[in-house]
Image (cartoon, coloured by chain):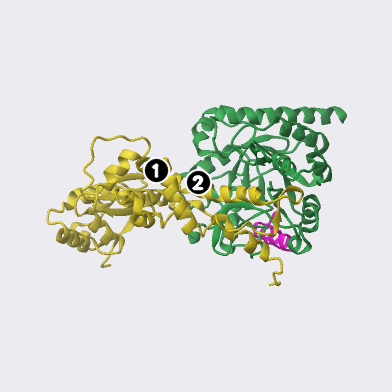
């Protein structure tokens, strides 16, 4: 590779873009040799505002919950601390839920980070690879004595988000103009995110469902996953859970694990 | 996510409209307009998409694009290749871009004379570069690499800029002309960018167009801009958030009169209007293009 004597222009131009107190780089000028401050600030503004807009597009329910001014101030901190590392903006903001969790001004909204995690999972499900979901009838093709050892392949869009709060209800009430009465935020809820056809679907997992699906996703056999769910939730209802997961298009194939 | 994007030639897409759409006006494709566009059925015109928005593995974006591509020519417009940056091109990004070209077989493929990534940070803006012999060589290397990867020439777009570099040794039109001659690439002339840059730097847009190698132009962009002013003066911002300004329409007519009709895109990326408004803007461009297509027939 040839040496880069001219590499300095990007190195000189870039650092002040996300740092409002840094000096404007000396390598640029305004029109007819005039000061470059206002002109350079156009780039600063473009970069910061477009990245805040990107977070607002990924996290609309979070923005609705906090209000736009609060959201944009919070997002500005995050954008400056953690700019994107990929040119694909739909991959941006993976660290934002954790940032929200430790953001001092959001402490009165303890469920906010989990709502953000659901929104992030929603976008990942939206862009996930295409695959035909397995119909519920697929289970019936196996003899009853083979069911226990089945291993499930989950659809590329399938995600689980667990919360100590009512994150699924709060998410649903604040996406796409949803409304709700008073929500008891302290009820723990787990979200199932799938894409059975064109649209991403977010729904509440029944008790034990998150442990059950997490086990299946990690490659456990059907019986192992059911046992783990029962241990976690003594009232775990296997029939309801498995029917709901098939209905949601969570799987793409079944393989006998002891074959 | 990278590994999921494999160049695949989807047999589902019949290769209609793999030719250049000629003197036809098109619009940016916005997913919010998808249902309306389908309702109207196939129509004259093409759609342009930002390549990066279709670099996910699957899902609704690809469904929409496949459906759109079935009946319309497509223009694939890359925004993030950092062709104008000093760093080597991002190979993974180039592979994704190549995959989209192979899958959708767009009639037009373009990128920007700008950069947007430095070290590990992506700035999501089209950042400027100095025009020197060294940057010229580097930009040409990058374009060679892109064209080799996708096995066809690209159209390189002139930027809108707000600052100038003290160490530039040539003007933008000389730089662009040299790039086109050395790499064989075509050019995407953004007339609004010319107007915005000329106003911001205090030069003549007409002179810029007189110096621009119009014979290499394979596509034109038109867009709206905004004014940002205070008592010390006015800056024009390339905001793509409104209708094309009257002065830009005027410049467009001048370019078409000299160059002849070329595919012309109305770009509208924020404060996106309802589909009929965007469509009407493209229809206005089509009137100008058609006028000159007729003019050429008469002359023949």
Name of the residue lying farthest toward the front: B231
Front residue of B29 and A19: A19
Colour of chain A in the rendered structure image: yellow
Q: Residues within 10 Å of mark 2 (few under 14, many from 20)?
A: some
What is the chain identity of the residue bearing mark 2? B
Q: In this image, A194 relative to A143: left or right? A: right
Q: Which residue is mark 1?
A: A63
Question: Magenta includes B241?
Answer: no
Both labels 1 and 2 in a single chain: no
Nearer mark to the viewer, of 1 and 2? 1
Q: Are marks 1 and 2 in contact (CB under 8 Å)?
A: no
Residue that numbered label 2 is attached to:
B62
Determine the residue positioned at 68% across, 28% down: B284
Where does residue B251 sit, x and y in percent of width and height? Answer: 76, 35
Q: Quadrant of residue B228?
A: top right
The quarter holding residue A226 reads bottom left
Span colored in magenta: B138-154
């Amino acid at each position: 590779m040839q040496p880069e004597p001219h590499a300095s222009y990007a190195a000189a131009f870039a650092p002040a873009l996300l740092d409002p107190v840094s000096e404007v780089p000396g390598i640029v000028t305004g029109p007819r040799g005039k000061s470059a401050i206002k002109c350079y600030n156009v780039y600063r503004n473009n970069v910061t505002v477009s990245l805040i807009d990107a977070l607002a597009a990924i996290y609309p329910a979070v923005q609705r919950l906090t209000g736009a001014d609060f959201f944009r101030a919070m997002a500005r901190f995050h954008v400056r601390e953690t700019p994107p590392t990929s040119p694909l903006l739909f991959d941006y903001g993976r660290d934002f839920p954790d940032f929200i969790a430790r953001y001092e001004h959001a402490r009165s909204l303890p469920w906010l980070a989990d709502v953000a995690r659901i929104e992030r999972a929603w976008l990942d499900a939206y862009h996930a690879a295409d695959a035909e979901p397995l119909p519920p009838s697929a289970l019936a093709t196996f003899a009853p004595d083979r069911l226990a050892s089945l291993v499930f392949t989950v659809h590329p869009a399938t995600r689980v988000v667990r919360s100590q709060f009512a994150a699924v209800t709060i998410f649903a009430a604040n996406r796409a103009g949803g409304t709700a009465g008073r929500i008891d935020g302290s009820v723990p809820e787990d979200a199932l995110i799938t894409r059975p056809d064109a649209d991403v679907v977010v729904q509440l997992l029944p008790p034990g469902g998150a442990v059950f699906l997490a086990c299946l996703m990690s490659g456990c056999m059907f019986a192992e996953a059911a046992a783990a769910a029962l241990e976690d939730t003594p009232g775990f209802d296997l029939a309801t859970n498995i029917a709901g997961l098939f209905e949601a298009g969570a799987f793409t194939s079944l393989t006998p694990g002891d074959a | 996510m990278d590994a999921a994007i494999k160049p695949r030639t989807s047999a589902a897409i019949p290769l209609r409209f793999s030719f250049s759409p000629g003197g036809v006006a098109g619009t940016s494709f916005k997913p919010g307009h998808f249902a309306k566009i389908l309702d109207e059925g196939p129509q004259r015109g093409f759609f342009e998409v930002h390549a990066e928005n279709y670099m996910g593995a699957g899902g609704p974006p690809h469904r929409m694009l496949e459906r759109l591509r079935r009946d319309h020519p497509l223009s694939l417009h890359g925004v993030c290749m950092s062709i104008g940056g000093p760093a080597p091109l991002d190979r993974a990004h180039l592979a994704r871009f190549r995959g989209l070209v192979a899958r959708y077989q767009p009639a037009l493929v373009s990128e920007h004379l700008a950069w947007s990534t430095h070290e590990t940070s992506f700035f999501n803006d089209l950042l400027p570069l100095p025009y020197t012999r060294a940057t010229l060589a580097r930009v040409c290397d990058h374009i060679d690499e892109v064209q080799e990867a996708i096995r066809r020439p690209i159209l390189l777009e002139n930027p809108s800029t707000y600052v100038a570099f003290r160490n530039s040794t040539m003007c933008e039109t000389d730089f662009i002309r040299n790039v086109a001659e050395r790499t064989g690439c075509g050019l995407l002339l953004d007339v609004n960018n010319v107007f915005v840059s000329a106003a911001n730097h205090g030069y003549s847009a007409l002179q810029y167009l007189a110096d621009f190698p119009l014979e290499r132009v394979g596509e034109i962009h038109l867009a709206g801009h905004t004014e940002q002013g205070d008592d010390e003066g006015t800056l024009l911002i390339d905001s793509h958030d409104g209708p094309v300004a009257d002065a830009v329409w005027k410049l467009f007519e001048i370019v078409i009169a000299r160059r002849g009709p070329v595919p012309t895109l109305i770009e509208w990326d924020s404060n996106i209007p309802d589909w009929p408004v965007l469509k009407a803007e493209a229809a206005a461009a089509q009137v100008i293009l058609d006028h000159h297509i007729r003019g050429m027939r008469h002359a023949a």
